[in-house]
Image (tube, helix red, strand yellow):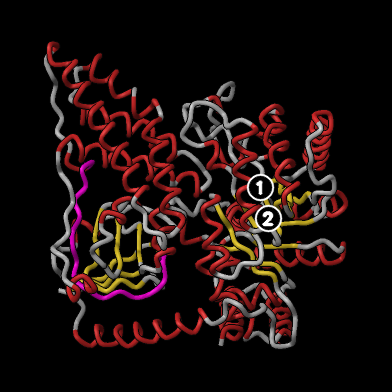
Amino acid sequence: MAFTLHGIAVSRGIAIGRSHLLSSATAEVAHYLIQENAVEDEIARFNAAVGSVHEELATLKGELPADAPPELAAFLELHSLILSDHLLSAEPRRWIQERHYNAEWALTTQMEAVVAQFDAIEDEYMRERGNDVRQVVDRVLRALTGMYNTLPEHDETAAAEMLLVAHDIAPHDMLQFKDHRFAGFVTDLGGVTSHTAIVARSLGIPAVVGLQSARHLIKQDEWIIVDGDAGVVIVDPDPLVLEEYRVRQSELELDKKRLRRLRGMAAQTMDGTTVELHANIELPADVPAALDAGATGVGLFRTEFLFMNRETLPDEEEQFVAYRQVVEQMPHYPITIRTLDIGADKSFGSSLDAGHAVSINPALGLRAIRYCLAEPPLFLTQLRAILRASAFGKIKLLIPMLAHAHEIDQSLALIEQAKAQLRKRGQAFDDTIPVGGMIEIPAAVLAIGLFTKRLQFLSIGTNDLIQYALAIDRADNAVAHLYDPLHPAILQLLSLTIQAGARAGLPVSVCGEMAGEPKLTRLLLGLGLRQFSMHPSQLLMVKQEILRADLPSIEAIVKKMLKAQEPDKIREWVQQLVT
């Protein structure tokens, strides 16, 4: 009997084929107590498994093909770092020694404690790193139990129709399946910013994640349709539905080929208005994908990855090298580096947590610039590293989650202090480096004059702005349906910010998910936006919408939208914009 599952669309396209179920080692862990005289042998067994996985990850990284997406090498390195963290590599030994748990039980017990810390994090990207921990643990459990996933012997026809169904799929699992072409995958876990989703977009594989129970509901070798545009999985579809999706699949393949032709074209509307298309990146290894998509700069370089899964803070030199790598890969384009967006709610069991209690309400607690201003030595170290990298290219410095004038003033004062420290050392930097602020809090929009007087550019983080304006945590399934970028209040906040920037002569960009949604491209153009920043995989689709846009007619419709209060009317006008 046919049925439909709804999840999160993370990689566009349509895949049609037969399901191949992958097992989860974490879901099948044996729990038993060992004897006192077996403790040392059990610890040795655990150590051997950890060592084996370290070797596997190193081998996979060394065997990466030249045309592999750059994200894969970065994620393999990140998983190696997670595995090296004492919370996973050492703490399970304590459970074995003190509680006499078997190695598998000790490891999953520790994993649950670590993942719980990630689950409490407000920021979606950082919260998704809990899945990376699960993936690393799953790999160690496979080494302990000898339970490895295998795919059928390579068959050119069957492989093209194979769709993977799993509780979760790690990027390194995809590498192990490199000799078996598969058309797409679905998972119970994951979100838009999970590393598995990022790799899926890089490979151009349709994927739907966050399905909760797909692994248990879908049977081996069933026909399924993965609609990566709608976030839908259709199981055992009837012939008419199957034929309809095959037609859509062919149309999408033609669209992909047409999009590739747009890479070298300037992003201009039909009336000749130029629009800047930049990329959001998380790692230096993301730059090749951004360039390949035709990005003309980096609109958001998240720096949190440097601080994750470690017991010591990255020093100035380590940060400087990472920032310089990005600049040197894009020497003629602007690189916007956001300072550390982390907080006391993000407890990684490291020195980042020292002296700060976990906030009762993390979204409203000590995070982002508030955290950095509370930790001047940490902030100054990062500022010096960014400033030093600015000597090698066009860097712009972005401060997150600003709301108060004194936060801006204190940040600017610390930037000047960092400059003075570098001058004393005799180290080069761009003395005129532009400093901008993230507009993520409604109060920042309503007091936008504080920002335009003090800063050189603005960047709207629509994800947080919508959550704060509507009091919605979109990761909370109970209220996620209320997360609405087309709410009339959100449109007003966007319009106020963009127009204030224009009056002050300041560039304004959008780096949240709205910038990468083609259906909203013309709306943002009509609001006056001229700089978009998004995941590289979205860039060509957004460019296509820009090339087809006629600004005068769009602006007339958007003016009507801004006067509207009824959601149905707003959506009706949005539909007019995209047709």
Q: Percent from the top left, x then y, of residue 532? A: 65, 67
Looking at the picture, which amino acid does disc 2 mark?
A: Ile
Q: Which residue is identified by label 2?
A: 335
Mark 2 residue crowding within 10 angstroms, few (<14) / some (14–19) / many (20+) = many
Query: Which residues fall within the magenta stretch?
Result: 9-26
Count of numbered circles on the image:
2
Residue 10 visible in the displayed image? no
In the picture, the disc for residue 401 is none
Residue 455 against residue 574 in the figure, above or below: above
Looking at the picture, which amino acid does disc 1 mark?
A: Arg
Q: Quadrant of the C terminus?
A: bottom right
Name the one closer to the observer, 102 or 316: 316
Asked which quadrant contains residue 496, the reply is: bottom right
Q: Which residue is identified by label 1?
A: 338
Q: Residue at x 23, y 41 (%)?
A: 26
Is residue 16 part of the magenta span, yes or no?
A: yes
Name the one closer to the observer, 521 or 447: 521
Q: Secondary structure at mark 2?
A: strand
Q: Residue at x 58, y 39 (%)?
A: 342
Name the one closer to the observer, 185 or 191: 185
